[in-house]
């Protein structure tokens, strides 16, 4: 299953960067909804409130802070069918065409 999420991020690498840049000043994360097959720029605070467990909220907060400090885009992959949320980082300025994300489970 992990490979499927990696493939989605690799396939949409440029689209993720473009979408993020469009909303960069608004503190957005990029949410990829696997079931809907769509990518959305979601305000960080709004998404954090959706997470039910305090542990998931804290993990997301750590991931978001890491992204901000290290000039990265936080990408969240949500798959309701398997009830999982994964996160990874993409360098804001990277021109890489091949990118293997390190996914972390937060839910």
Image (cartoon, grey):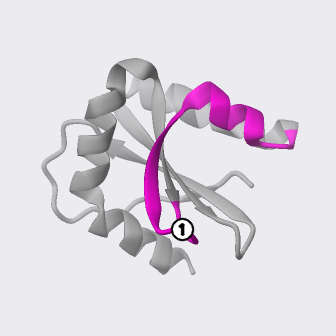
User: Can residue 71 be seen here?
Assistant: no
Task: Judge whether 65 appears above or below 36 on screen.
Answer: above
Compared across the picture, whether 17 is left or right of 41 comes to left
Task: Judge whether 34 appears above or below 67 on screen.
Answer: below
Q: Is disc 1 placed on a helix, strand or loop?
A: loop
Q: Residue at x 54, y 75 (%)?
A: 2
The N terminus - image quarter: bottom right
Camera-nearest residue between 85 and 43: 43
Mark 1 lies on residue: 36
Residue 19 x, y percent position in the rendering: 30, 42
The C terminus - image quarter: bottom right
User: Can residue 95 be seen here?
Assistant: yes
Does 35 appear in magenta?
yes
Residue 100 x, y percent position in the rendering: 34, 65
Which residues are the magenta region? Answer: 33-53
Q: Residue at x 69, y 34 (%)?
A: 48
Does 11 appear in magenta?
no
């Amino acid at each position: 299953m992990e490979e499927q999420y990696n493939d989605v991020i690799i396939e949409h690498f440029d689209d993720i960067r473009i979408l993020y840049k469009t909303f960069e000043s608004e503190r957005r994360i990029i949410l990829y909804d696997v079931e809907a097959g769509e990518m959305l720029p979601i305000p960080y605070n709004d998404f954090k409130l959706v997470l039910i467990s305090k542990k998931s909220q804290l993990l997301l907060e750590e991931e978001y802070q890491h992204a901000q400090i290290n000039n990265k885009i936080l990408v969240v992959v949500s798959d309701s069918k398997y009830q999982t949320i994964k996160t990874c980082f993409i360098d804001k300025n990277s021109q890489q065409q091949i990118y293997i994300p390190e996914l972390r489970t937060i839910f």
